[in-house]
Amino acid sequence: MSRPKVSVIIPVYNVERYLQECVDSVRRQSFSDIEIILVDDGSTDASGRMCDEVSRIDQRVRVVHKQNEGLGRARNTGLDVASGEWVMFVDSDDFIALNTIEYCMGIIDRVKVDELRFLFEFFSDGKKSPGIVPTGSDCHVSEEKWVKMEPLMDSMAELPGPRSFIAPSIGSACTALYRREIIESHRLRFESEREYISEDYLFNIEFGANCGGIGYISEKFYFYRSNPLSLTHTLRRDRIEKSAIYCRHLQRVLESYGYPDSMGFAMRSMVGYLRTQNSHIFNSSLSLREKRALFNDALSHPYIAEIASVDIFGKGLFKQKIAFALRKSFFISWMLYKLNSLRKGM
């Protein structure tokens, strides 16, 4: 049996409510030369049994059952058994448009890339798959080492200076097709999200640093379930510490590949996590006193103090520099948050 063109890896953990919709969106792709790898990450609900059932009715589906280790490790398990020329990842509570793979492979056949990135759209419970997404956007391609990663990295943290390459992008590993040869030849794998909070970003940086061309398109093929109770959207008291651990590791990874602004990029990423933590504090049901205490705890973290002692913004990010300085005040930060919330609501 010849190897499939695309391996679609779906980590599965306790998603019996959403799994069928996710898997169906992959099984019904207009491009059929695929294998679907369902990695049951120690589910305790009916998810594991559902995976086995779908494998019996579709020979393209492979199921791996394993003990629970988290999303990153489940993706790695999928990579260990994947055989496709290309790889993509879908989270088991999300879904993709039915023409996703066909359209992306059509572009890949025309342009020289090792990675093709697209966009996503949030949805809430009750929204159904649109089926086919309209296509026809330009494909922006670059092969220069760091230039090709500018759109991706710009979605992770502010980049100083003018952009040499403008294209739409986000940092998720679920909004791309990756050439598997690059992954295997450089032994690339995901870190555990239990250790580093943005394992997607780390994987994308390492893949980008080792691959040839990257292409960017603006089609929103991926549909990401918006869950206000997820860890991403809720107040976590350990977020600043975990963010600091991740950003220090991010700096080391960038330095290992010779990125010229490793420290600045990592620190600006940390400023972004600080803004996120503050928004969660302000939006919480805590008392004013508790909010202020958490806000001050975050500001007093050694890594934040280190960031405040150096200029990571320069002339190219003057507004961000001013905003970071103002955020040392609890009440100014809260006011800015409220104003921004009002602006978004208009």
Image (cartoon, rainbow, N blue to C red):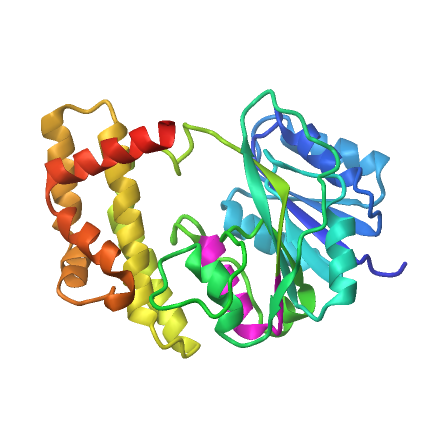
Numbered label tally: 0
Location of residue 198 in the rendering, given as x and y in whole percent from the top left corner: 42, 52
Residue lying farthest bottom?
258
Image position of 321 with respect to 208: above or below? above
Image position of 252 with respect to 152: above or below? below
Location of residue 40 in the rendering, given as x and y in whole percent from the top left corner: 62, 40
Q: Is residue 312 visible?
A: yes
Q: Which residues are magenta?
A: 199-215
Residue lying farthest right?
1
Relative to 295, 258 lies left or right: right
Q: Nearer the viewer, residue 234 or 184?
A: 234
Please identify the quarter of the rendering in which residue 180 is found. Answer: bottom right
Q: Is residue 248 visible?
A: no
Please identify the quarter of the rendering in which residue 105 is found. Answer: bottom right
Image position of 67 with respect to 24: above or below? below
Residue at 64% across, 26% down = 46
Prevailing secondary structure class for the magenta stretch in the rendered image: helix
